[in-house]
Image (tube, rainbow, N blue to C red):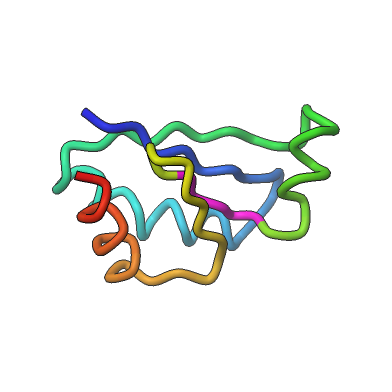
Amino acid sequence: MRDLVIFTGDQCHLCDQAKELLLPIIAENDCHLIETNISSSQKLKKLYGHRIPVVVFPSGFEKGWPFTANQIKLLIGKEI
């Protein structure tokens, strides 16, 4: 099982949309989604504050919003 990390924030409607888009894809691809809320870390706020939601793939590649289901599927395929 591969882990994908999604960086999110408090009361972020885009983050909610991104998670809804990701959940069926990760289920289909035997992945695990790890949600990390940036609000408790100054370092993460600095890195991702203006870009959330951001998905980080096992290779370290980051894809920030906006993204489509097809883009995520292609990126997961490249990680195999």
User: In the rendered view of the protein, which quadrant contains the C terminus?
Assistant: top left
52 left or right of 68 in image = right
> Main SS of the magenta segment?
strand
Q: Residue at x 71, y 49 (%)?
A: 48
Whether residue 19 appears in magenta in the rendering, the answer is: no
Q: Position of residue 6 (x, y in %)?
A: 51, 43
Magenta residues span 52-56
Quarter of image, res 77: bottom left
Q: Residue at x 31, y 67 (%)?
A: 69
Residue 36, placed above or below residue 7 = above
User: In the rendered view of the protein, which quadrant contains the N terminus?
Assistant: top left
Q: Position of residue 39 (x, y in %)?
A: 77, 36
Whether residue 55 appears in magenta in the rendering, the answer is: yes
- Numbered label tally: 0
Q: Judge by depth and name the residue closer to the eye, 20 or 67.
A: 67
Residue 74, placed above or below residue 25 = below
Quarter of image, res 75: bottom left
